[in-house]
Image (cartoon, rainbow, N blue to C red):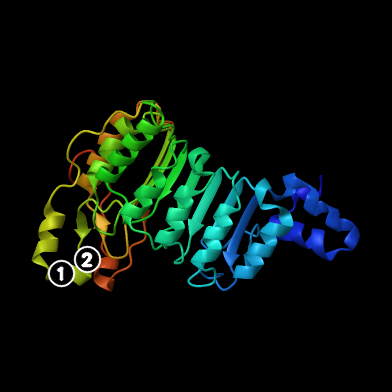
Amino acid sequence: AIVTELDLRDRLQVATCVCKGWRFLKDVSHLWTSMRVAGSSSESSWRDRGSHDRVTVSNSGLTRLLDWVGAASLTELRLHTGDAALQPWTVTSTLSAVPAIKVLHLGGKKVNAAVMEATAKAAFAPTLREIHIGEDVAGSEARILSMLQEMPALESLSVPRGRVSAPMLRTLAAAWRTKRNGGPPLLSKLTLATSWGQFEWELVCCVGSLFPELEELTVDSLSVGLDVPLSSNEDNAAWRDYQAQPKVRGAVDAMPRLVRLRLQRFCGYDFYACSSEVAACLRAVLRAAPALETLLVLGGELTSTRNRADKTLPRPTDAAGAPPPPQSA
């Protein structure tokens, strides 16, 4: 019972380093159902730096580790290749050795088209419940879509920045319905990250009708019109014209089951979303989610020239402009 409370790294040390008598622990299958591994040179790249429940391995080390614990017992695998520590062939062979996993997190520059193709063909794909695709993977939107279409049982999905669009989600939802013989997608948790400075409002508008079981939604990088222009684009007329256009257009499809909503990064490296657009975004989304219980809105961090960094930023209000002054007694 005590060993089950230890993190993965400590469990491995107990089972291999204490004495030979403790090595029977490798045959206790419930101790090795979840594994978080990173390439041995990828400590600085590993997203979850605060966690101790991971081990760092080489290509051959990952193969030996899976052989030792018994890959068939794994139900959760979180793998980060680093920049070049774990090679694609190691990742593909690992995925073919874990037929029972229900949770899969993939990150790192060596997660490429070959890895995604192997993931789509893996034995676990039709029954996978959760997948998180890191921002630093090398696959394209089309390749990610092709992989996800083979996972109709997904309940939780996180798609990386710049690899998601409204047409992609529509195609994905249609593919899942076909594989489920006309039944609606099971997806209940969705995380979307849009490209820097390019907010696609249609993404927010369509998810309710595409995924009727959706209960939790996170949308990242909401640069919906700027009060502080990007310094690198000050002389770019096309960029200024784009930012002058209202981004919040059209109604949001109903999300009757949504209970948790997270909207983040209205403010970024050197931009800040204009308050009227933020208010319009919030009004539209809240109208579509009558059962909402938790709303989290994150501004982000503004880092720019001293002039802009010192600028007083407006608060989002229902009406454009400043809120009315308080009434005097």
Can residue 231 be seen here? The reply is yes
Please identify the quarter of the rendering in which residue 8 is found: bottom right
Q: Is residue 158 above or below residue 178?
A: below
* Direction from residue 279 to residue 158 in the image, left or right: right
Q: How many labels, in total? A: 2
Q: Amino acid at mark 1?
A: Glu
Measuring 23% from the left and 44% from the top, which residue is drawn there? 201
| Quadrant of the rendering where the N terminus is positioned | top right
Residue 37, position in %: x, y? 60, 60
Q: What is the x, y in percent for residue 36?
A: 61, 56
Whole-percent x, y for residue 258 in the image: 40, 31
Q: Can you tell which mark lies on residue 230?
A: 2
**Residue 42 drawn above or below residue 91:** below
Identify the residue under disc 1.
Answer: 234
The quadrant in which the C terminus is found is top left
Residue appearing at x 47%, y 64% in the figure? 108
Q: Picture quarter containing residue 176?
A: top left
> Type of residue at label 2?
Leu
**Badge 1 density bin: few <14, some 14–19, many ≥20, Cα 10 Å:** few
Q: Secondary structure at mark 2?
A: loop
Q: Are the residues tagged 2 and 1 within 8 Å (C-beta)?
A: yes
